[in-house]
Amino acid sequence: MFTMNEKLKELSRQGKDIRTSIVGAGKMGKGLVNQMSRIKGMLPSLVINRHIEKAVDALLSSGVSKDDMVIVESLKDANFYLEKGKFVVSENTELAAKANIIDAVVDATGVPEVGAKLSLDAIDNKKHIIMLNVEADAVVGPILYERAQKVEVVYTGTAGDEPGATMELYNFATGLGFDVLAIGKGKNNPLNFDANPTTVYEDALKKDLKPHMLAEFVDGTNTMIELTSLANATGFVPDIRGCHGIESDINSLTDVLRLKEEGGVLNKYGVVDFVEGIAPGVFAIITTKLEEVHKQMEYLNMGKGPNYVLYRPYHLTSLETPVTIFEACYYNEATIAPTKGSIAETVTVAKKDLKAGDMLDRIGGYTVYGSIEEHKVAMKENLVPICLIDENTKLLKDVKKGQFITYDMLELDTDRTIYKLRKLQDKTIG
């Protein structure tokens, strides 16, 4: 962090601030705008939201005065005022990647279709793209990453999100020569597959969250999506469909997340999973083949082994995203990216009994939730990634509660960018 601060201060002294577009001024986007206001050398120059007042409020809450911001609709106006040093706000998402002096685009929408379009725009315009939108990354991240590589821009998930925070532990451990056995995250809310916007409404208001977002957390879909992105970045897989989701504290974690023949629950190592009881942290279970290192680990109070836990007890979501913006723009490096291709999938499960002709809804809704599975199994069984489902998805067959949904059961909106990207990804990457 010291290096980042010093290099950003130098950029600021040279008048070469990193200028970003932030799309989505909800909880994550607003937090990022505010945090960036405290960092020299990095500016939230362009803030876009479908309701303009939220974009304005994000900048006002960070200390930007109304005199220093301009509301625009056109690219011409955006470029004019950005070059004048103004903060620009708009409802026009297309401006994010097309504005001339923007270095990086941050997607803080959480909407898969928006993420797909925005990422393509950023890559086509040779801007770095930072995904606070793990929902899009989990379903089309591999092809977006491949396209970004071809034009030498960075496609990356973000520091602060659980996949990014876990990836930091993974890189730390593997960089030191440890063997990593399992990685994952704590789950903040007790798992309830039946959760929907109505059942979580009061709690959502207290937490200043949209009911759909909280329902996505409670029904486990968000956890499955985050573990999918982590799998695609590391090559690790779910040990079983949906993961084990054990309850444990940190001290007991190595006793449970070990092989069955060792007294644990795992069929194999090299897995992603989630744990109730250690939220909001992330973890990596590691070991070594060297006796001397085992002695050192015991001396350092890391436990008796042979497995040990690296644990980070927090993740600061979008408040950490400036780290990823800096690393992308200064070093051309990603915090986390689907470098291993399609390893896992968050597939679709019926949340209740449904009838042919019913319309489904989006993630965190009333009709479906997500469960993680290996990509090769999902492909073999024709299972549908949940991030392809939206309000325009029509059921063609009756479906029972808890049943996994396959492509032949649905009529999908094939005109969407995310659908077309996913079909291309399946053909070219697998």
Image: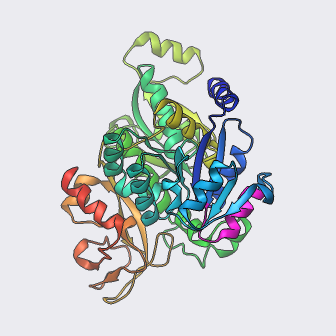
**Quarter of the image with the N terminus in it:** top right
- State the residue at coordinates (29%, 74%): 414
Instruction: Please give left or right for residue 428 compared with residue 142 in the image.
Output: left
263 up-or-down from 47: above or below: above
Give whichever of 137, 262 is nearer the camera: 137
Task: Count up the numbered dots.
Answer: 0
Q: Is residue 16 left or right of residue 62?
A: left
Magenta highlight range: 48-60
- The residue drawn where x is 65% and y is 40% is 42
Question: What x and y, as percent, mark residue 367?
Answer: 44, 78
Q: How is the image coloured?
A: rainbow
Residue 57 at x, y percent in the picture: 74, 63
Q: Is residue 224 visible?
A: no
Q: Residue at x 46, y 52 (%)?
A: 226
Q: Is residue 138 left or right of residue 206?
A: left
> Residue 110: image x %, image y %?
52, 61
178 horizontally vs 169: left or right: left
Q: Look at the image and say whether residue 386 sits in the magenta stretch.
A: no
Q: Is residue 50 magenta?
A: yes
